Amino acid sequence: MLTDALRFLLNTVFALIVYSALLRFIMQWLRAPFRNPLGQAVAAITDWAVKPLRKVLPGFRGFDWASLVFAWLAQLLWLGALAALGDAALSGPLAGALAVLAVVELLKAALWILIVAVFLQALLSWVAPDGPLGGVLNALTFRFLAPIRRVVPPLGGTLDLSPLIVIVLAQLVLMLPLAWLEQTVGQLFR
């Protein structure tokens, strides 16, 4: 029972940190505005680690490497803490497997961020298209929706299926290659 409570706390704290750091990386990569409640929250949650890391890992070619490395390190610590909680001995091969699994988990998290952003953008386009998150959601989803919109025009001139198609494709990537990778790496823990 205590183990379940500790696992819950670890998952809650690390999920907030990892998703915030990854969202910071994605927002900067896609040039999403930070002058909104979401951008300010992401910066507040991650500044303590990203700013010192930038002295060692400066941005390069539009990528905020400090945010990405921080997200990976936090994911690695998260997985290590969960493995230690499950009585796994962190030997050399296990540590390497955790490092690879951290990359797989970050890819999964990035896809979930995309799915949520597309869903929220579609929902807000009906109720509050000019809300404070409109610009950030548009920046996060435009590069994924635009190619599909060029191929699949709106039905009846108004019904845009591109958000549904992006969500289905992201779910397929989660279900097939990433699940296979996760399973393959997970076998190293046994």
Image: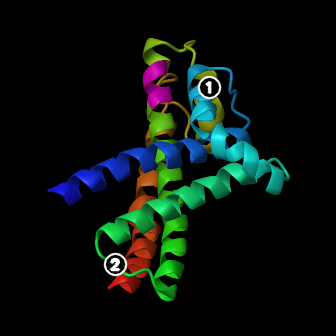
Query: At 52% across and 49% down in the image, what residue appears?
Result: 18
Taking the spot 50% from the left edge, 27% from the top edge, the residue there is 121
Q: State which quadrant residue 37 falls in.
A: top right
Residue 121 included in the magenta stretch of the image: yes
Judge whether 54 appears above or below 84 on screen.
above
Nearer the observer, 76 or 125: 76
Q: Position of residue 3 (x, y in %)?
A: 22, 59
Residue 136, disc: none
Name the residue nearer the viewer: 183 or 73.
73
Identify the residue under disc 2.
88
- The residue where tag 1 is placed is 40
The front one of 142 and 150 is 142
What x and y, as percent, mark residue 68? 66, 54
| Display colour scheme | rainbow
Magenta stretch encompasses residue 88: no
**Image-based side of 117 in relation to 60, left or right:** left
* Residue 28 horizontal/vertical position (percent): 72, 40
Helix, strand or loop for the magenta stretch, by majority: helix
